């Protein structure tokens, strides 16, 4: 297994007080009780106290990104993560620009679909379900088409669980004078994605991912020069990042009704993130979750889609057993009965399912997850969790 997590154990985290199942998903995810509790108070969206909360949120996210020179700014946007991704694409890609989309899963495909809706010219390097885009092929694509102005990539493609090689990709992009835009929805806050880690013009994430808040807004961290250039470029009134940025800087308010309770919860989530030790400590806990869970699942006979070097600390894809008694819907229901909600797979070649490592969970929870998986297999009459041969053949493509 990857050696990114310490072998040192800590005291268990508090279990969900309301008795709800753990969400083994890439967000929404299991949150701390204090995060839920922060939503019990109402806030006026125009009030000075809430405006101060918004300003604090923006400052703290810039701190996480490592903006020490004031070159970047943070713009929160109402809605789900996909709202912020669309806002970012529509605001930062000129209408006469051309985008190279690096796609190796469902969310890369969604980016290409979004660009088609926006009427932005784009081409795609499609690596299929999980193969990582690599620097040399990015260089080759940019050399072949000098009209490409921007490259867009998903940092952690949760449809497979792969962590894409962002530093390698970024170096390739800027070696050819293009600009990089990053969808770090499921990585920012737990995987290095700061300004010093690799170069980018803008990066986007969401409240309900590795910061461990609840759904309701995303946020874009972008160079101020890109924000200024985005004026009048957006296709949308409500998804105009420049307009939101300009209005927030002038008034301290969101342009339209903000998710006030979600902001309050996020500030508490940021406090817990800082208290835990920031990106490094949050990532170490998630990596430990992954290591313990993957080792246990492999002992139970399950096989991962990805080899160890590509496993992210965010979510892991497992091949479904070939055993005729295995049915994912039944397995899902049995796992939920035991207190764990897992995620269906998104691979097109073979059947799979996913188990998330993020959220207010620790290695003690992950050991219980493995026990629940073993018990569920036994209840189904599955005595062998090995996948079909085609699954291992598919995996060998990545190892080659």
Image: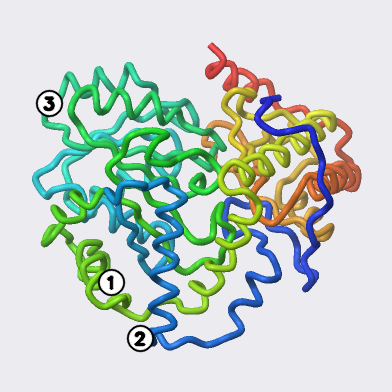
Pointers 1 and 2 in contact (C-beta within 8 Å): no
* Residue 248: mark: 1
Q: Earlier in the sequence, mark 3 or mark 2?
A: 2
Vertical relation: 108 (above or below) 335: above
Q: Residue at x 52, y 74 (%)?
A: 264
Q: Could you say whether the residue bearing mark 3 is in a helix, strand or loop?
A: loop
Query: Local crowd at mark 2 within 10 Å, few (<14), some, or many (≥20)?
Result: some
- Residue carrying label 3: 146
Vertical relation: 327 (above or below) 138: below
Q: Residue at the top extreme?
A: 400
- Residue carrying label 2: 46
Q: Residue at x 85, y 48 (%)?
A: 368
Q: Residue at x 66, y 63 (%)?
A: 31
Viewer-nearest residue: 129 or 311: 311
Relative image position of residue 230 (x, y in whole percent): 16, 55
Query: Local crowd at mark 3 within 10 Å, few (<14), some, or many (≥20)?
Result: few
**Left or right for 381, reference 55:** right
**Left or right for 371, reference 120:** right
Viewer-nearest residue: 22 or 16: 16
Q: Earlier in the sequence, mark 1 or mark 3?
A: 3
Relative image position of residue 121 (x, y in whole percent): 16, 42
Q: CA distance from mark 3 to mark 2?
A: 46 Å
Vertical relation: 398 (above or below) 365: above
């Amino acid at each position: 297994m990857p050696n990114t997590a310490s072998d040192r154990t800590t005291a268990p985290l508090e279990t969900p007080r309301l008795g709800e199942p753990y969400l083994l998903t890439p967000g929404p995810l299991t949150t701390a009780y204090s995060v839920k509790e922060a939503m019990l108070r109402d806030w006026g969206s125009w009030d000075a106290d809430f405006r101060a909360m918004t300003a604090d949120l923006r400052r703290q996210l810039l701190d996480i990104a490592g903006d020490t020179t004031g070159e970047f700014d943070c713009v929160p946007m109402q809605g789900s993560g996909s709202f912020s991704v669309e806002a970012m694409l529509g605001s930062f890609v000129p209408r006469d620009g051309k985008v190279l989309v690096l796609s190796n899963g469902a969310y890369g495909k969604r980016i290409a679909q979004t660009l088609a809706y926006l009427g932005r010219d784009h081409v795609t390097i499609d690596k299929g379900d999980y193969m990582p885009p690599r620097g040399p092929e990015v260089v080759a694509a940019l050399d072949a088409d000098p009209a490409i102005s921007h490259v867009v990539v998903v940092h952690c493609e949760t449809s497979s669980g792969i962590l894409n090689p962002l530093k390698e990709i970024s170096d390739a992009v800027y070696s050819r004078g293009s600009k990089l835009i990053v969808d770090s929805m499921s990585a920012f806050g737990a995987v290095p994605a700061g300004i010093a880690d690799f170069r980018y013009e803008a990066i986007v994430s969401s409240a309900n991912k590795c910061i461990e808040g609840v759904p309701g807004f995303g946020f874009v961290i972008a160079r101020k020069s890109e924000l200024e250039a985005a004026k009048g470029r957006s296709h949308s009134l409500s998804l105009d990042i420049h307009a939101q940025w300009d209005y927030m800087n002038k008034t301290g308010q969101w342009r339209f009704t903000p998710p006030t309770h979600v902001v309050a919860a996020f500030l508490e989530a940021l406090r817990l993130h800082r208290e835990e030790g920031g990106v490094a400590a949050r990532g170490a806990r998630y990596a430990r979750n992954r290591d313990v869970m993957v080792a246990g699942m492999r002992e139970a006979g399950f096989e991962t889609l990805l080899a160890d070097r590509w496993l992210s600390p965010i979510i892991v894809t497992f091949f479904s057993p070939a055993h005729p008694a295995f049915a994912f819907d039944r397995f899902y229901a049995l796992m939920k009965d035991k207190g764990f909600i897992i995620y269906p797979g998104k691979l097109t070649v073979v059947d799979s399912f996913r188990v998330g490592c993020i959220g207010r969970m620790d290695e003690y929870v992950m050991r219980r997850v493995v026990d629940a998986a073993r018990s569920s297999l036994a209840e189904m009459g599955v005595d062998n969790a090995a996948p079909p041969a085609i699954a291992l053949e598919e995996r060998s493509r990545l190892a080659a």
